[in-house]
Amino acid sequence: MKYFTIDELLRSHVAQQYGIVNVPTPNALCNLRVLIEAVLDPVREAWGSPILVSSGYRCEELNRKVGGAKYSFHRLGMAADIYPKNGYTEKLYKLIEHLFCTRKIGLTECYMDAKRGYIHITHNCEEFNEWPFLTLNTKQA
């Protein structure tokens, strides 16, 4: 793990605010390592500048508190919401598309929420999609 750490994928302001202990299961911890090594680090390497995590692993309680989907990949350690430190979210999204198309990374789902300024990435080793991309909320606020 070159650029990302497990700790930053566990960090949550909401968990801190509400005293939620956000500890991954052993399986989720393994999935987080795979997510970092197979997707996040290669994306960061290709991007060439810092990428930040706004949401990574979420225990059931934290996922409920943030309004996440009941069966969210975040709960399994297979998803992260990321954004570039320099603010070029759409450009990073296009890079992720390129890395997927050139088979540098595998993805189950990927979408950009430009209004909120993040890109959601899911990496499930058992279920890669042929075209996992969807752009949401593309109008800037």
Image: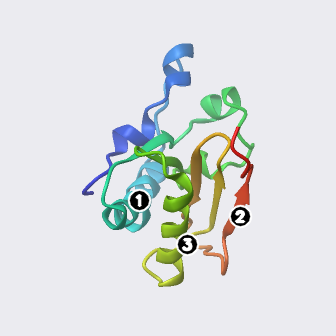
Relative to 85, is 129 on the left or the right?
right
From this view, report whether residue 85 is shown above or below residue 44: above
Relative to 48, is 64 on the left or the right?
right
Residue most toward the bottom?
102
The residue carrying pointer 1 sits among few (fewer than 14), some (14 to 19) or many (20 or more) residues within 10 Å by Cα, namely: many
Q: Label 1 is placed on what type of residue?
A: Leu
Quickly name the residue at label 1.
40
Quickly name the residue at label 2.
134
Q: Could you say whether the residue bearing mark 3 is in a helix, strand or loop?
A: helix
Query: Is tag 2's residue or tag 1's residue first in the polypeptide sequence?
Result: 1
Q: Could you say whether the residue bearing mark 2 is in a helix, strand or loop?
A: strand
Q: Toward which corner of the image does residue 129 lie, by quadrant?
A: bottom right
Tally of marks: 3
Query: Is tag 3's residue or tag 1's residue first in the polypeptide sequence?
Result: 1
Quadrant location, the C terminus: top right
Quickly name the residue at label 3.
97
